[in-house]
Image (tube, rainbow, N blue to C red):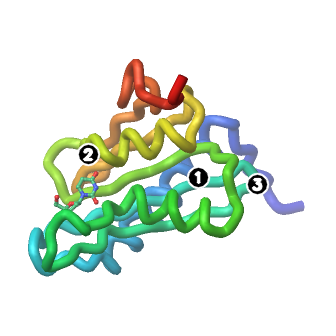
Amino acid sequence: MPHQVLLSWKDEKQMADTKLIDLAIEASKFAYVPYSHFPIGAALVAADGQVFTGCNIENASYPLTNCGERTAIFKAISEGVTDFKELVVYGETQKPISPCGACRQVMAEFFKQDLPVTLVAKDKSTVVMTVGELLPYSFTDLK
Ligand code: THU
């Protein structure tokens, strides 16, 4: 009888997080960043377990740049997926990457306030913040 290794819920969560971080790092390799040379990768997990990855895509007209997080979110939304579990964002930064204001506003549009966002640095150190913490008192409704 082979030895059975029982994984705790915590171990499984940690393995899943490691996999998502690796997917975000892989996605950052597709970043189109001829201007900033600052690749970003994201991995967005939908409620049904599907993962949408994204990278930043720059343009000679700088403001047209799309951030990695928004690429992942827009990929999911454009495929009819609207229910999400978590987001991982990777940047080659010393401290875990800090998403820009535009991305925080887009997160507030499509994610629940308590959705966890794992921010990852170059050395894979992480900070986990909720959408509500990233953008408190956000503008989400016209009335
Ligand atoms: N960028 C992202 O893709 N996500 C972030 O969270 C921060 C900034 C991109 C935009 C641009 O391509 C480059 O990083 C430098 O600002």
| Inter-mark Cα distance, 2 to 3 | 27 Å
Q: Which mark is residue 100?
A: 2
Q: Secondary structure at mark 3?
A: loop
Q: Which residue is mark 3?
A: 48
Name above or below for residue 115 compared with residue 102: above
Q: Earlier in the sequence, mark 2 or mark 3?
A: 3
Q: Secondary structure at mark 2?
A: loop
The answer to which image quadrant residue 100 occupies is top left
* Numbered disc in front, either 3 or 1: 3
The answer to which image quadrant residue 33 occupies is bottom left
Q: Which residue is mark 1?
A: 16
* Numbered disc in front, either 1 or 2: 2
Left of 65 or right of it: where is 70?
Answer: right
Residue 18 placement (x, y as % from top left): 48, 54
Quadrant of picture, ligand 1: bottom left
Q: Please identify the quadrant where the N terminus is shown.
A: bottom right
Crowding at mark 3 (Cα within 10 Å: few <14, some 14-19, many 20+): few
**Residue occupying image coordinates x 25% and y 47%:** 97
Q: Nearer the viewer, residue 27 or 99?
A: 99
Name above or below for residue 106 compared with residue 33: above
Q: Amino acid at mark 1?
A: Ala
Q: Earlier in the sequence, mark 1 or mark 2?
A: 1
